[in-house]
Amino acid sequence: MSISELPVISGRKAVRVFEHFGWQYRGKSKGHFVLTKPGVKYGDIYVHLSIPDHREVDRRLLHKLVKMAGLTDKQFREAHDEL
């Protein structure tokens, strides 16, 4: 799946999809939703996701967030379609 096949979604909808995979909403900081999941690393760093509270999240950013979460674009798209 390519980046262009990721859905065009809002930051709020992206939060719901990541929550489907066990990510937990931790609050809002400077217009971004912050999510965490214990034990998830990107390289050697523990990950938190910072998702902008926008009507549309840029697909390149969404792709990067999906990758940081340890998911594939296909997994994200399928979960989005189920919700």
Image: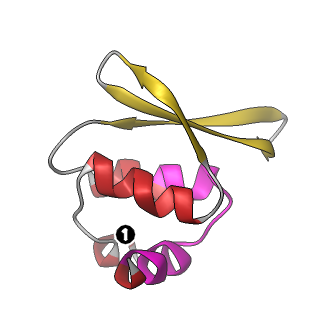
Label 1 sits on residue: 3
Magenta-highlighted stretch: main secondary structure? helix
Residue 41 placement (x, y as % from top left): 79, 43
Task: Kindly indicate the quadrant of the structure image that contains residue 19.
Answer: bottom right
Q: 32 or 1, which is in the foreground?
A: 32
Residue 36 placement (x, y as % from top left): 64, 38
Q: Is residue 66 magenta?
A: yes
Residue 55 placement (x, y as % from top left): 14, 47
Name the residue at 52% across, 57% down.
18
Left/right of residue 46 with respect to residue 68 in the rendered view:
right
Residue 24 placement (x, y as % from top left): 60, 44
Name the residue at 29% across, 23% down.
31
Q: Quadrant of the N terminus?
A: bottom left
Name the residue at 35% across, 53% down.
60
Name the amino acid type tagged 1. Ile
Task: Kindly indicate the quadrant of the structure image that contains residue 14.
Answer: bottom left
Left/right of residue 43 with respect to residue 61 in the rendered view:
right
Rendered view: 31 above or below 81: above
Magenta residue span = 64-80
Residue 1, visible in the rendered structure: no
